[in-house]
Image (tube, rainbow, N blue to C red):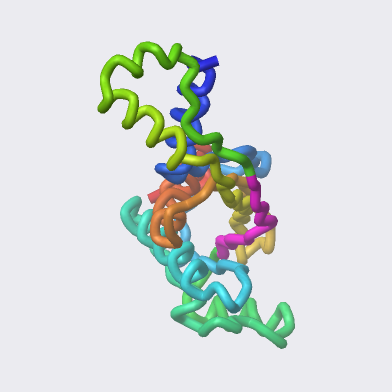
Amino acid sequence: MKVRFVLYSLLMLLLTACSSSRITHSWKAENVNAKKFNKIMVVALIQDNDVMKREKMEEHLIGDLNEKGVSAVSSLKEYGPKSFEGMKEEEVLNKLQNSGVDAVLTIVLLDKQRERYYVPGRVYYSPYVIYHRRFWRYYNTMYDRIYSPGYYQINTRYFWESNLYDLSSKELLYSVQTESFEPESAQSLGHEYGKLIVKDMFEKNVLAK
């Protein structure tokens, strides 16, 4: 029992101490070779009350694309939080193409789930006689047991999707779904996400420098 408790505690510590993101599925259209775009517009679709998360998601993805020699810009910085609200398709396409954009990469928050689990307090199964012989051992053991009660922990999982569209053909070239577990901040979430997506697009020969 004690071994199981220790292993459980270590697992929970690892899960809560660092954030992690992973790709759950990615797809590339058939007969698509790596292509060099003039300028990619990164568009994050996240609720307006979370502008910071949207800013960081776009910012990091753009930075990772730029590091690979791919020109990219932020829809938030270029057009503001409402971007293309109220516009028709042709108006949006003309607006983008007139500014030199020939591809759009979206970031969409598909779902957000909160998980609640119980972390047990410290429990000792060793015979008390071991600790009774010395006051300080006994005191520390019982102190931890009394003042380290269990508690509930709430973690959050984010489910994302990104699509790359070629504006010249209006076709979907690439799509990827990811899962992020309890990110420490919008900054760390954006950093992990950008690295994952850009790496996968180059590995699948979707983009060229």
Residue 72 in percent (x, y) is at 42, 65
| Residue 137 in view (yes/no) | yes
Residue 175 in percent (x, y) is at 63, 49
What residue do we see at 60% from left, 78% from top?
A: 48
What residue do we see at 51% from left, 23% from top?
A: 5
What residue do we see at 43% from left, 49% from top?
A: 192
Residue 187 in percent (x, y) is at 40, 60
Q: Give the extent of the magenta segment.
A: 104-116
Whether the magenta-drawn stretch holds residue 115 is answered as yes
Residue 108 in percent (x, y) is at 63, 61
Main secondary structure type of the part rendered in magenta: strand
What residue do we see at 69% from left, 56% from top?
A: 111
| Residue 173 in view (yes/no) | no
Front residue of 105/128: it is 128
Image height of 45 relative to 143, above or below: below
Front residue of 80/124: it is 124
Whether the magenta-drawn stretch holds residue 131 is answered as no
Q: Residue furthest bottom?
A: 86
Q: Split into 4 quadrants, where in the image is the N terminus? A: top right
- The count of marks equals 0
